[in-house]
Amino acid sequence: GGGGRIHDAEHSLVDYNRSGVPLLEIVSEPDIRSAEQAKSYVEELRATLFAIGVSDVKMEEGSLRVDANVSVRPAGTSGLRTRTEIKNLNSLRSLVRAIDYEARRQISAYEAGEPVVQETRHWDEEGGRTRPGRSKEEAHDYRYFPEPDLVPIAPTDEMRARVRATMPELPAARRSRLVAEWGIKDDDARVLVDVPGLADYAEKAVAALESGAPRDVVNWVRQDVLAYLNESGASASELVPEMLAELVRLVGEGTISRNQGKDVLDESLREQKWPRDVVEARGLAQVSDEAALSAAIDEVLAAHPDVVEQYRAGDDKERKKKRAFLMGELMKSLKGKGNPQLLNKLLDERLS
């Protein structure tokens, strides 16, 4: 399997670290027409295998690898030409790059009148190119032989019915349900379902919401949680969904602002801390008590009667300038902790 061989110019060493681990090989028909189609196929396959519990589908760790068979032909023709097989691609990015490179290489060879040899090739990520491995012009190079301890399995109708009855929700159905129930976009649902464990995390966070809507959870997941996962290499299954639900509540209630929420969530994810503890430790809680904010507004307006008079007598430009000054004084008075939405509303009421 991928990662099981060490190659150099003269020989290959075989690593038996996966001995005893079953290998499932899924072979597609030769009907994929582009690197992007291949990527979409693997994404859907990966999401399905994860959903039914077959694999953790961590490509970079070897739980899922892709071999890409590539051949090219002139537009308008139908016959299959000589193919090469690119082995053990360990990321979707490598899959796309390897197929695109190999297609260009074969086209260049045909245009130059050179033959394309049926062979195994390996992807050089650093060099951005495929390199030849062993030739496979003859089918008997594989040296297949029966394994006597692995007998063929012919699933019965009863077995298929039993398996079908225990099948979990598959990716396509889950995407459709999330779009219908949460009112989110198809693209949002696809990201949630296609990233292993992310939909489970989001659904548990939504279930734990005390306030807010599913879309609030989805926005945080797509914009911040996903960025953290990509940067850290962590998996969604390691995260605590109730922590995200708490963050949604803190922002929704005005305890912290959206911008503060991004910093709080970042620390919460990295340190596995509850958002309320991060807010308390940093002293971030906003003043959202209407009486306290009204009192602060009264003090600032009383301290700057000339600015208030100029605001009321001025044109739009002047009013905007004076209002910005008053808001700045308010935030100073409140040490930057006034709930800006509520503060703006109350200030407008006082100045009207």
Image: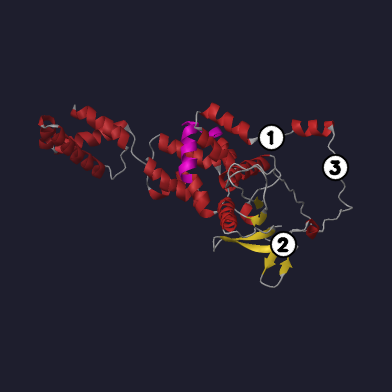
Give the x, y percent position of residue 145. Answer: 85, 55
Q: Report if residue 218 lies within the magenta region.
A: yes
11 w.r.t. 34: above or below: below
74 w.r.t. 218: above or below: below
What numbered label is drawn on residue 135? 2
The quarter of the image holding the N terminus is bottom right
Judged left or right of residue 272, residue 345 is: left
The residue identified by callout 3 is: 153
Residue type marked 1 = Pro
7 w.r.t. 95: above or below: below
Observer-nearest residue: 81 or 277?
81
Rendered image quadrant of residue 324: top left
315 w.r.t. 148: above or below: above
User: Residue at 31% across / 33% down in the picture?
Assistant: 342
The quarter of the image holding the C terminus is top left
Rendered image quadrant of residue 291: top left
Give the x, y percent position of residue 103. Answer: 58, 53
Residue type marked 2 = Ser
Observer-nearest residue: 307 or 185?
185
Q: Report if residue 121 lies within the magenta region.
A: no
Furthest toward the right, the residue is 148
Looking at the image, is mark 1 or mark 2 earlier in the sequence? Answer: 2
Looking at the image, is mark 3 or mark 2 earlier in the sequence? Answer: 2
What numbered label is drawn on residue 234? none
- The answer to the question of whether label 1 and label 3 lie on touching residues, with beta carbons closer than 8 A, is no
Question: Label 1's element?
Answer: loop
Residue type marked 3 = Ile
What numbered label is drawn on residue 168? 1
Judged left or right of residue 191, residue 82 is: right
